[in-house]
Image: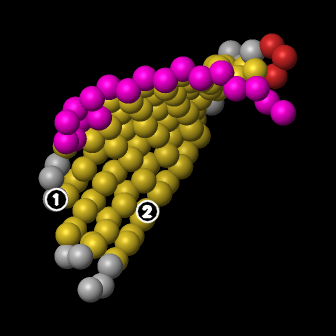
Amino acid sequence: NHNTYLTAQITGVAYATTLTNSLTANQVFGQKNVVNSLQLSRNVSGGSIRSQINYNLAPDKGLATIVVTADYPLREGYLANFNATRTFTGTPQNNYSLTLNKKN
């Protein structure tokens, strides 16, 4: 068996927002897969907001996941993080997390 992987990525910055688009194609055990990922990130009021949309182009076409993440620094070295993920493939589901981290 011959496995093949190919990835192309382009990133641009405009109006303090970073936009990255990645296209990944692979063939593993004869199965061809093509996935596109679009990411946006921006710093807002000392914190950051990021989003990512993944969609399948082959063998099946359709939206795979949407992710939104926000980080915000708090006093005394703490960082609050919120993450929301919506999965559309397989069994669709929503996942949410809220974390609090202490910087060293």
Which of the two discs, 1 and 2, sits closer to the camera? Answer: 1
Q: Residue at x 27, y 72 (%)?
A: 27
For the residues labelled 1 and 2, the Cα–Cα distance comes to 18 Å
**Coloring scheme of the render?**
secondary structure
Please say whether residue 4 is one of the residues in the magenta stretch.
no
Q: Is residue 85 above or below residue 4?
A: above
The overriding secondary structure of the stretch rendered in magenta is strand
Place of residue 33 in the rendered image (x, y in percent of width and height, measured from the top left): 25, 62
Place of residue 39 in the rendered image (x, y in percent of width and height, measured from the top left): 46, 40
Mark 1 vs 2, N-terminal side: 2
Q: Amino acid at mark 1?
A: Pro
Residue position for label 2: 8
Instruction: Quarter of the image for the N terminus: give it.
Output: bottom left
Q: Is residue 25 above or below residue 63?
A: below
Q: Residue at x 15, y 53 (%)?
A: 60
Residue position for label 1: 59
